[in-house]
Image (cartoon, coloured by chain):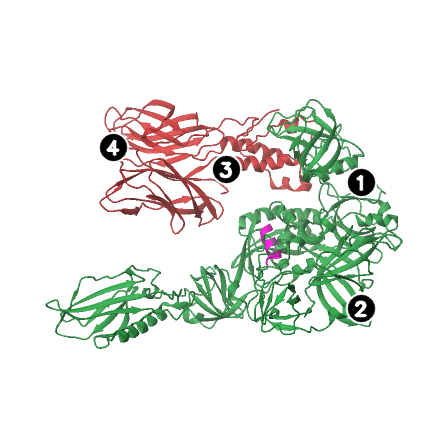
Amino acid sequence: MAIVTPAGVGIVPQWQMLLPQMVAQPLQTALRNLNYLHKYHQPALVTACVTSDPLLTRASEYHVPIIPSADGLRYTFETRFVCSNATQTVNVSLDYCTTYAGGATVWTNLTANNVITGGAGTLTTRTDANLTIPATAVALRWTLTAPGAGSRTDHHLLCYPTPSDATATAYASGFRCFDDGLFLDADDAPVHTEWLNRCKSSASAVLRDRKQMAFSFVQEYRTDPRIIRSGATAIYSARPIGRAFFPNQAATATLDVRVIAGVSAGTTAGLVSLAQVGGAKTAFAASGNIESGTLVVQFDGKGLLTGADLQFSFGNTAGNTTRPFAIVAFYTPGT
Amino acid sequence: MIYDAHKYGFGCIYWITVSGVPVVWIERVTGKALPAGYTTEDASLVIDDSAEVGIEQIDRDRGTAVSLSFGFKLLDTAEARDWMRRWSDQATLTTTLTVGGAVATVDSTTGWPGAGAFYAGLERITYTGTTATTFTGCTRGTAGSLAYEHKPGTTAQIITDRPRFWRGREVVLWATPVDASGYVAGSNLTDDAVQVWRGRIEAGPDRDVDGFVFQAQSLDRVLDQPLATQVTGTVADTSVKYAAKPGTQITVSIEAYDAAGVQQWAYVLEMLPFAAYTAGDMLSADAMRELIIAAWDNAVTAAGANANLSSMRFYKDKTIYTTQVKYLADAAINKIAQFVQINGTDVTSLKDPILSGTLTEIWIDLWKSAGDPSVPWSVAEPAGLNSLTVHVDEGDPADVPTTGMVWLGGNGVKYSFVYQYAATDGFELYLGGVIQGGYGTAPKLTPAQAVGMTATVQLVTAGSFPTLMLTTLENSGTGQRGTYDTGPRGKGYGIDDSAIDEDSFLSAAAPLGSMTGTLIADGSSFSERLGGALGLFRMAVACRPDTSATYRALKLTLVHTSPFGAGWTTTIVDADLLSHEGDPVVSVRRADSANTVKVLRKVGDSEDVLTATDRDQVDAVGSREATYMVPADDRETLFAAALPAIASHFASDQTAQAVEVRVPPWVLAEVGDIVEFVTTHPAVWTWNTSPGQVGYDGPARVVGKRMNLKTSQVTLTLLIGGGVKVRALSPAAEVQAFDVAAAPTRIDVPLKYLSHFAQSITEAGGPVKVLHYYRIGPESDIEGYTISAAAENAGLCRLTVSAITGAPVLSLASESYLTLPTVGGGDLTAYQATFAHIDDGTQWG
């Protein structure tokens, strides 16, 4: 018996799907594709072009809410930044938490490494591969230290699943792998319905388990971040509109939205919202904790250009400051 | 089953029920207890003159059954005469009787008994009391009839004490067993009874020499009836309208002062401009402005301010209307102060006194913010065609959905629009947020052109194809027919869910089961709307017995029509054939199979065509075209599914063969079933490779079944796949429960596998071996159980274990499954051979 993970998706020619001409393993090809899907379906759990002051000469940290796989998968992290001076040492530290409490959060370190940058002004990409994020994690933290000389400008944070080969175990997501032995080892074995159903159920389990970040606003976590709302009177204003694409998806989707935002004082309810332009809107409190909600979006466009225009807004109460740190939305296929 | 007893000399006594008539019409009186709601049995039924009943054949391309009519006669008995007579009591509904209403209000109940029953349309309603103008204590939909809403102005407004018409009433033909001595066993007429036929009266009663003759059509023929349920009318105007709020109150205070600050005059003007209207009345912004001006004039007069204040005028400033009032010029007046409230909210825009100077007029802003929909009188009419007010001349405006489509025009020129909002005002229909469709194929209509045009509002239904089918079958506007009786009346036939096998629709496999579509009610029938999708994917809707239901109730059922399938419900052998009336097996000439197939995706104005051609066949015999219209939402999804379906048509239709076989009634084969047909009859085209051998041994699809009511002889139409050998996946059953994991004596699996395991045991003539494996690995092919019996137990299929092979350990956590292997590389039984195995030549592996 062997659990084979093909290097690419196997395509069954259409003529092999016709019952009279069914001559070659269409079911086995489909089932092997499950193992491929498990290993190579890698939607970004986090993808964020961060907001911070440019030319930083200080350390920075970013807090990003996440909804990781129920299977406790390995993930690969990529961190991109630019240093003004050549060959600087920047320490990139990655942490996760299972309970988020703002500055009082207890973080568990995934890895911390010193990165030696290249030439002055060149983009540095730090890759930390195959770090396991438990299913119970609720947020990630990126921390970058100040370079020894010159400044650092943070660009982008990325985190995507890089699972190991599927094994013959019951995955919490509902995924079940395919073992060639089902076909090859059996003496009188039936070719049965459960295998066909497994094609659908396991593929669906993988797609739904690995949520994809469809919208992100992440800015430096500090008392005085770059984008705030404050003043003597209450002001509520919108940020620029962003278009999120959902290629070839159905007419609507329910996005899972997570928000981290804080206030200097005063009430927090409804100070942050995410909306579809011309559509639904969901409001969140700037409580300092992770706030959860959903947003139903109606797609327009067709095919690869299927998408929706999203916009987040936030406001302050009179005399107080509101600080949005992360507004992210996750897409689950089929919702 | 009732017909098994025919083998031992039993026969049948037939009886019918007609919806709304509480009489069992039967061949002879039995004295048995009648079904609930029926009070009398009358020995007047004659069915001998009826032709065969049942389904002659399924039209595989249109997805419908070609079913036979049922003719019956009620002899001229006293009971029959009493029901055929003209009504003696009559009244007219004066208000709408809602579908659940317990009180019917009429013009007069004079002459009616204090308690009894009356008929409104097809519905029979019992009542327990009367007043001068009401029937009280109404029980709706009695004696098998269905409840509807009845409105004045419809045929149902006239209520009578006898049915005014019989056409459309449901007829169910029943058969109850009777022994050779003529005795009907049991205490109830329904004991051991089955439904034989179900349909609706199409014609009758017609007077015959000795009775009353009726003709009825099968329930599945209803699906060919057009659903003519559009709301039509004429466009009266195109101005944007808003719902009136009668309580809207506008208060304006105006005060005049001289240079020393001494008040010269002051008035408080209270206005209720829309008080004469009721909530929901639709008014244009122009009409509202005129009403406000009139209210101002009245208020000025009431306040005695005519000497100082003129009439109000509206002026448009860009997109906002504001008001202008002139006051009497007076050199003494130096300041004007104004205060404005709308519904108690201060909307004063100029609170500080206005220095008059040479001012002789003041502006009063009766709005707070631009575009505020709560003050529509301030909003300017937008350019273009945005709204339609339609005077309805056919249909009920209340049936119009809140969003949808409307067509303007006719006689070959039609303009389609979508609308975002609908409101009704009596027989006036207002459609707002109107956007012209057609993707530029039609010129844009101007408001002036639209006025006077015929408007046809389309009723739209969207959802998966099973949902579309069930909604079209059940929709009655009452919400009472079943889960899918949703939306306004007019989208469907109003068939009760007791006459529909919903599970057969909901379990429809992909692609049809998962595809979504949109239906637009354009006066077409179920067959015209959905028959293309059914035909393309070789499915059909037929009225057939639900073999698991009480009385084998006849229901509209979604069945397969391809000649392929695995497993079978029964086996038909030569010994089952009836030859006393001639050749028991007759080859049926089928319609020429198409070699060019067009799939037309059409939803509203959106239309795509996919054409596939079997070139070899076209070259040989010329093009024979078939078109399937499918109202699918997504072009790519449909065409991806259609291509293999069409290829399957090409591959199988060339060789498929249809035969009619005459069998006794106890052969349990229903339309849509796969049966095993083993015959040596030479009428069946054979693909046996041995020269000289004739006959057939393999699966066949039942695509027709009709019965002679006098002889009970059944004629089945079987579709045989010709030379195509097909095996299907073997069922694999998830273990639900067991007694001992390592040494079970019983294993429970889902009930849907009962027939499969039972059939396996029957075909094998004894216990069968099943394979055990875990859904999560590692799997084994050497562990299994020997199953000696399968039976229903507490909603599951319980398998009795008689032996264990290897050392399997059942586990719910590891997801134990059972499935059917072969033995020694060969198929155990012919039934087993219909399923694919690794080593049996099907080459799945």
Location of mark 3 (residue): A208
**Residue B470 belongs to the span the image colors magenta:** yes
Q: Dot 1: what SS?
A: loop
Image vertical order of residue A232 relative to residue B461, above or below: above
Residue at x-position 47% and y-position 40%:
A332
The amino acid beneath tag 3 is Arg
Q: What is the x, y in percent for residue B155?
A: 61, 70
Give the letter of the red chain: A
Task: Indicate which disc residue A55 carries.
Answer: 4
Task: Please determine if labels 3 and 4 lie on a single subunit.
Answer: yes
Chain containing the residue with disc 2: B
Give the letter of the green chain: B
- The stretch in magenta equals B466-475
Q: Dot 2: what SS?
A: loop
Task: Please determine if labels 2 and 3 lie on a single subunit.
Answer: no
Task: Indicate which disc residue B689 carries.
Answer: 1
Location of mark 2 (residue): B77
Image vertical order of residue B746 relative to residue B490, above or below: above
The amino acid beneath tag 2 is Thr
Q: What is the x, y in percent for residue B762?
A: 78, 37
Chain containing the residue with disc 4: A
